[in-house]
Image (cartoon, grey):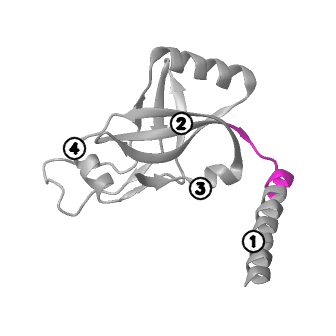
Amino acid sequence: MSIAQNKKAFHDYFIEEKYEAGIVLEGWEVKAIRAGRVQLKEAYIVIRRGELFLIGCHISPLPTASTHVNPDPVKTRKLLLHAFQIKELIGKVERAGYTLVPLDMHYKAGKIKLEIGLAKGKKQYDKRESEKRKEWERDKQRLLRMRHS
């Protein structure tokens, strides 16, 4: 079940591969995510010292959050992957000019997971081409519906 999606990533990037990563979260963050108070739109992933970190993911604390915890909505969160996957991603990002973007946050067996994509940036004309293709598919479906009714 999807919690939050980053639709902008599919508009701005060609997604080559997808990986599923765990996220290191605190208790108040888990509660806020379960309440749907998370946003991936401005988020991105960086590699530091052989580890992956999610930056810019906004998790709004619940108003009932504890008073002794000082919640930071946009703090850096560590991502959990197997070592061989991290090495593979580091190699591709450094050599081939790829970038890592968060695509989808979802539940899996009661845990909150983040789907990350190995992506290459789209140029402006690529975005226009994608938009034209989507628009044509919509028009085609509309015409087929009108024809069959």
For label 1, the crowd category at 10 Å Cα-Cα, with few meaning under 14, some 14 to 19 and many 20 or more, is: few
Q: CA distance from mark 1 to mark 2?
A: 37 Å
Precedes in sequence: disc 4 or disc 3: 3
Precedes in sequence: disc 4 or disc 2: 4
Q: CA distance from mark 4 to mark 3?
A: 27 Å
Please give the range of residues in magenta: 119-127
Asked if disc 4 and disc 3 are in contact, CB closer than 8 Å, the reply is no
Q: Residue at x 44, y 32 (%)?
A: 21
Precedes in sequence: disc 1 or disc 3: 3
Residue 125 forms part of the magenta stretch: yes
Q: CA distance from mark 4 to mark 2?
A: 22 Å
Q: Residue at x 65, y 34 (%)?
A: 99
Q: Residue at x 74, y 42 (%)?
A: 121
Q: Nearer the viewer, mark 1 or mark 3?
A: 1
Q: In the rendered image, which residue does mark 3 sit on? A: 7
Asked if disc 4 and disc 1 are in contact, CB closer than 8 Å, the reply is no
Q: Which mark is residue 27?
A: 4
Asked if disc 3 and disc 2 are in contact, CB closer than 8 Å, the reply is no
Q: CA distance from mark 1 to mark 3?
A: 22 Å
Task: Determine which quarter of the picture holds residue 39.
Answer: bottom left
